[in-house]
């Protein structure tokens, strides 16, 4: 008689602490996203792209509310770094917006590409172990991909120095993810 292979094997981090880390980092990321858009709107709030940015910002607020709820219901310790993401997110949004609307959109493309990969990895690790979390992640991920498409439609890739800017933002986003899973 063979039993089905468990999703987590002995010696793995426990499923419980693994999903806690996922919720912690996702809440941190969605919080950071709201701060990026707040920074962009502080600069571009009256610009041509303000409507599109505001719409994305509202969806980030919804994602954040969903992860806030999971943090509360499951008593997950939130990241201790939210004061950092409060400032760093806003600064990233405002700085790219000051470079222009296309650079702000390049920021969105870069962040969303990292987040898409991050959510895809989480979905794979979760499998069928936690449908509630998996559905929350899948819904947010679909919105993030739509944000990426919106930003590309706003000529993100026409930003001067796009590859350099995009690479730097992606590196920063990956560091933020790494830290928020742990701290
Ligand atoms: Fe989001
Ligand atoms: Fe997004």
Image: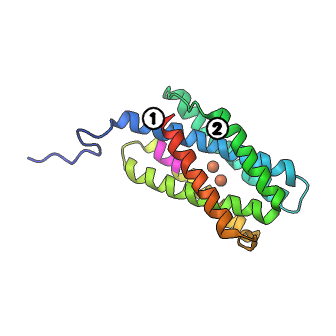
Disc 1 element: helix
User: Which numbered disc, 1 or 2, marks the residue closer to the eye?
Assistant: 1
Give the CA distance from mark 1 to mark 2: 16 Å
Magenta residues span 133-137
Q: How is the image coloured?
A: rainbow
65 or 18, which is in the foreground?
A: 18
What residue is shown with label 2?
A: 65
Q: Is residue 135 on the magenta stretch? A: yes
Residue 62 circle label: none
Picture coordinates of residue 13, whole percent (x, y): 33, 38
Picture coordinates of residue 151, whole percent (x, y): 71, 64
**Image side of residue 152 versus residue 101, left or right:** left
Q: Main secondary structure of the magenta part?
A: helix
What residue is shown with label 1?
A: 20
Instruction: Answer whether residue 136 is visible to the viewer in this image.
Output: no
Disc 2 element: helix
Picture coordinates of residue 183, whole percent (x, y): 51, 34
């Amino acid at each position: 008689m063979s039993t089905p292979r468990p999703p987590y094997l002995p010696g793995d981090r426990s499923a419980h602490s693994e999903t806690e880390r996922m919720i912690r980092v996702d809440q941190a990321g969605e919080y950071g996203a709201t701060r990026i858009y707040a920074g962009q709107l502080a600069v571009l709030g009256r610009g041509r792209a303000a409507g599109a940015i505001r719409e994305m910002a509202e969806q980030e607020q919804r994602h954040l509310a969903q992860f806030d709820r999971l943090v509360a219901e499951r008593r997950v310790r939130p990241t201790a770094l939210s004061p950092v993401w409060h400032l760093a997110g806003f600064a990233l949004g405002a700085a790219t917006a000051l470079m222009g609307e296309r650079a702000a959109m390049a920021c969105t493309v870069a962040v969303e590409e990292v987040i898409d990969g991050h959510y895809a990895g989480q979905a794979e690790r979760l499998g069928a172990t936690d449908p509630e979390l998996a559905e929350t992640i899948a819904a947010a991920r679909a919105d993030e991909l739509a944000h990426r498409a919106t930003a590309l439609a706003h000529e993100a890739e026409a930003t001067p120095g796009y590859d350099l800017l995009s690479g730097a933002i992606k590196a920063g986003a990956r560091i933020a993810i790494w830290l928020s899973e742990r701290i």
